[in-house]
Image (cartoon, coloured by chain):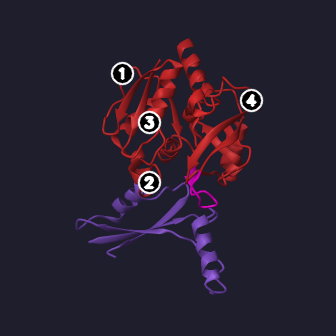
Chain colours: A red, B purple
Amino acid sequence: MKAAVLVFPGSNCDRDLQVAFEKAGAEVSMVWHKEAELPEGVDIVGVPGGFSYGDYLRCGAIAANSPICASLKTHVERGGYAIGVCNGFQVLTETRILPGALLRNANLKYICKTVPLKVQTSDSIFTRAYNAGTVAHIPIAHHDGNYQADAELLAELRGEDRVAFTYEDNPNGSAGDIAGVLSANRRVLGMMPHPERAADAGHGGVDGAGVFQGIMDALVEA
Amino acid sequence: MKARVHVMLKTGVLDPQGEAVRHALGGLGFDGVEGVRQGKVIELDLADGTSEATVTEMCEKLLANTVIESYSIEMNA
């Protein structure tokens, strides 16, 4: 299974994502934002956390318009898989690959702590390792994680079972307590919490490892 | 020539920063501030003859996220 992790100026979770993919057994290429093409044969693209372009203009907005993101869009349009974590989720909403938007946390504070998340669906490669209803403890570390979705979008996401994770104790004001959402074809996940930071016993928790194991198992079977 | 783009959160999108500013104004003794919305102003230096349609395209593609933000354009600002 081949994964590519995108690297923007200001990304800081790119190597964590690489390690988590490798630990699950993937072959990982790191891809600089100025590259026009993803490497041949990539199954899944990881868009990492961090502060791409210093969060200038809006979080993820400049990265979303970088050359590699054009290739990411093509990959997704062809039915390719992708996961965006934290700033990566912001990039995925800015590219409109995922719906909604992420605004400043309702309490205006940067929040860095491990939070309980409820797995809302096991129907995706990202969540198949979990039973729906499971509570997983995964760290968040963000200033702009307040997911915005109007009533119509919320109804659509819920109706299509596309809410992947919700916060048990909403830390940032997100609509519907949403922490992670799936694309309509269920092949793209964006989430604010960092599963790659809870993927090894040395991290102090392994509740996020299932995300990478699920991806690996599904794509190796395919 | 110059153009000025104003970007604001759409009506109905809660603006926590504006709300914090409103509280702070109250703390300074300015009574009667019923709401504050915070946005941004982007000034563009453009080649002569650049059309408003081009600036609109810039707004749609990058300067505003129209999921949550609205924008207005002043040409020759």
Chain for disc number 2: A
Residue identifier under label 1: A40
Number of residues whose C-alpha sits closer than 10 Å to that of mark 1, classed few (under 14), some (14–19) or many (20 or more): few
Name the element at disc 2.
helix
Task: Give whichever of A184, A124 is nearer the camera.
Answer: A124
Discs 1/2, front: 2
Q: Which tag, 4 or 3, sits closer to the chain's start?
A: 3
Mark 2 residue type: Asp
Pointer 3 with pointer 2, Cβ within 8 A: no
Q: Give me the disc on residue A85.
A: none
Residue position for label 4: A132
Percent x, y of residue B3: 34, 70
Chain designation of label 3: A
Cα distance, mark 4 to mark 3? 28 Å
Amino acid marked by disc 1: Glu
For the residue marked with disc 3, what is the amino acid? Asp
**Between disc 1 and disc 2, whose residue precedes?**
1
Residue B9 screen position, x and y as percent: 55, 64
**Boundaries of the magenta span:** A101-111
Residue bearing the label numbered 3: A14
Q: Is residue A93 above or below residue A104?
A: above
